[in-house]
Amino acid sequence: EAGVAQSPRYKIIEKRQSVAFWCNPISGHATLYWYQQILGQGPKLLIQFQNNGVVDDSQLPKDRFSAERLKGVDSTLKIQPAKLEDSAVYLCASSFGSTWGETYEQYFGPGTRLTVT
Amino acid sequence: GNSVTQMEGPVTLSEEAFLTINCTYTATGYPSLFWYVQYPGEGLQLLLKATKADDKGSNKGFEATYRKETTSFHLEKGSVQVSDSAVYFCALSNAGGTSYGKLTFGQGTILTVHP
């Protein structure tokens, strides 16, 4: 079974530029998550999708970050314009579902390491 | 809100030593608890989990017991190997509430095992 795919693996940009990350979840997984992992910290949820609908985007800085999940499969996370503090690893994860009262394992991709200079 | 606190600072051990990494949590309701591991250059992998009080999760010689009375989920291994060197994250997830499934992570503990 193929795992969660992410690209690119590394990206270096200057502040105020824009950048986009792509994620392809495990086939059949309805729930997709984007996490931000700053160096020395644990991952923090940015946005959660259930199929192509947003479940939680309360921690997403909406003035500069946007995300979409077209057709309930692949997802793209965009930052425009980037700030120095956006330097982090961006992790995509997927799970079979997210149902009230149930816990499903999340599978993580390798992440995209973003450096903003 | 939910939060997870892991023991401070990196841990350095000799091979075959006993390992404990402390984890405590704050959460509403009855969360599920997890330990994730991140090996150098690799993504996060689920190591073990426990979904209710007094459950013990185990995998690859690692164990952790869900202690509701002390809100803890400490990770232990009786004899570590060099290959266990990695970053370990404690995490929780609520099966209910407004954002079920979302993981809340601790800050991570770097483990280095020397031969």
Image: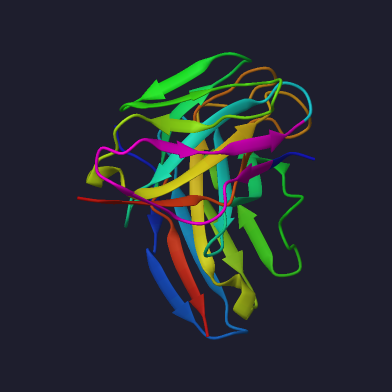
At horizontal 30% and vertical 37% (from top left) the residue drawn is: A2
- Front residue of B59/A56: it is B59
- Which residues, given as a range, are shown in magenta? B4-27
Q: Is residue B34 magenta?
A: no
For this view, does A28 lie left or right of residue A79? left
Q: Position of residue A14 (x, y in %)?
A: 53, 86
Name the outermost residue toward the left: B115
Q: State whether residue B83 is above or below residue A112.
A: above
Q: Does the magenta stretch include residue B22?
A: yes
Asked if one can make out residue A50 in the rendered structure from this viewpoint, the answer is no
Q: State whether residue B104 is above or below residue A12.
A: above
Quarter holding the N terminus of chain A is top left
At horizontal 65% and vertical 36% (from top left) the residue drawn is: B24
Q: Where is residue B90 in the image (x, y as percent from the top left)?
A: 54, 39
At horizontal 72% and vertical 49% (from top left) the residue drawn is: A57
Q: State whether residue B69 is above or below residue B44.
A: above
Task: Name the quadrant containing residue A4.
Answer: top left
For this view, does A20 lie left or right of residue B63? right
- Front residue of B101/B108: it is B108
At horizontal 58% and vertical 82% (from top left) the residue drawn is: A17
Q: Position of residue A13 (x, y in %)?
A: 49, 81
Q: Position of residue A28 (x, y in %)?
A: 45, 29
